[in-house]
Amino acid sequence: PETITVQELANRMAERAGDVVKSLMKMGMMATINQTIDADTAELVVQEFGHRVRRVAESDVELGMRGEADDTADLLPRSPVVTVMGHVDHGKTSLLDAIRNADVAAGEAGGITQHIGAYQIQIPSGDKITFIDTPGHEAFTEMRARGANVTDIVILVVAADDGIMAQTVEAIRHAKAANVPVIVACNKIDKPDADPARVRQELLQHDIVVEEMGGDVQVVDVSAKTKQGIDTLLEAIMLQAEVLELKANPNRSAEGVVIEAKVERGRGSVATVLVQRGTVKVGDVFVAGAEWGRVRALVDDRGAQVDSAGPTVPVEVLGLQGTPTAGDEFVVVENEGRAREIADYRQRVIREKQATAGARGTVEQMLSAI
Ligand code: GDP
Ligand code: MG
């Protein structure tokens, strides 16, 4: 049930608790400062004091702030978002670099030079693919644990001279748990002791049946070093993306996920955000986890300032009041008051959780007043 203590209600209105008690008495209720009252009563008190009432639903925090599902009529095709996983030293970083260099939209800007946590390339067909630039299953599971499902496809990198190793198995497990399709990149094919046939056999033991063996998992032999097979891998991604029929509504207020966030000298708090639906614009007010801000500037993966960013376009967002956490939800809201309110509320919940760490604390604040 939605309840709040008299003291907490007073705090939120910046009124004296004694005055709240008096107000309740006038309404025929005898309550002490530590007593809880229900939300309806609290609302009356708030109005009595001449404050505006706004209930912040528990679901705002538990489930996030995302709006309702879009009408299918508003959905347009979108690019796939890909995460690279695999055992240490099997070539994840090298592969991400090779793919970055395969971008055909380099043009005047000079290609992807910035490491902002994600980048989007264009392939010869004209299609675009977004890559999360932080390889590894930790980032993947951490984001998933925070409720952020950003990845459409996992590229499982397996070194052909080494085969399936412990972290390969882990990556397979994570991809399966997340129900995200896998494409195997059999890397280091340039090495004399590369044994791609063995990789396929070993995959079989982990329920990854590649197409050549009658299964539905694509496998591409690549060399991040010589760039052999990179184009084929990118085509394989687009093939998989077609099967997934990825769509998003670009014409709505933006929602997405924080891929990474940090404080930078001279720039303040900077978050790399991957927009998942809608379009974020300079001037938009947003909430990112327990932080909020107004978009002061948007910077793309080429270091260029842009006015807006739509679905699957990664951008650095400047204008944050604090630093959010990777995996936090990014949601544009209608105004600053609302943004502050949600951020305040979430920070309070975080503080309370920390305060009651270990003990079972109940979050009773479901009503906030301004
Ligand atoms: P990560 O730990 O998975 O990110 O692996 P790295 O990308 O750092 O690569 C580990 C080592 O393997 C580095 O010394 C790379 O130069 C090397 N390497 C990566 N890909 C290839 C490849 O395709 N061929 C060869 N010969 N070496 C590679
Ligand atoms: Mg690496």
Image (cartoon, rainbow, N blue to C red):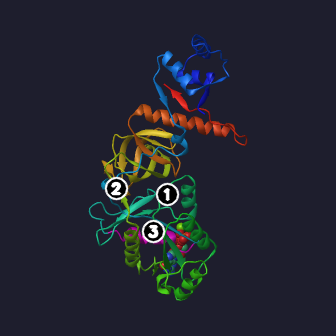
Q: Nearer the viewer, mark 3 or mark 1?
A: 1
What are the residue bounds of the magenta stretch? Answer: 89-103
Under circle 2, the secondary element is helix
Quadrant into which the N terminus falls: top right
**Residue 336 locus on image (x, y percent):** 41, 33
Residue 321: in magenta span: no
- Helix, strand or loop status at disc 3: helix
| 51 left or right, relative to 245 | right
- At x 44%, y 33%, the residue is 338
| Relative to 344, 78 lies left or right | left
Q: What's the amino acid at mark 2?
A: Thr
Q: Would the CB of label 2 be found within 8 Å of ligand 1?
A: no
Measured in 3D between alpha carbons, the distance from the residue under mark 3 to the one under mark 2, in whole angstroms, is 33 Å
Label disc, if present, on residue 54 of the rendered structure: none
Distance from the alpha carbon under mark 1 to that under mark 2: 20 Å
Please check the rendered image and state whether residue 99 is part of the magenta-colored stretch, yes or no: yes
Do residues under tags 3 and 1 come within 8 Å of each other at their CB atoms?
Answer: no
Label placed on residue 96: 3
**Taking 238 as reference, is 271 left or right?**
right
Q: Which residue is mark 1?
A: 149
User: Which quadrant would residue 366 be assigned to in this image?
Assistant: top right
Of the numbered discs 3 and 1, the one sitting upstream in the chain is 3
Disc 3 within 8 angstroms of ligand 1 (CB): yes
Label 2, on which residue?
A: 72
* Prevailing secondary structure of the magenta residues: helix
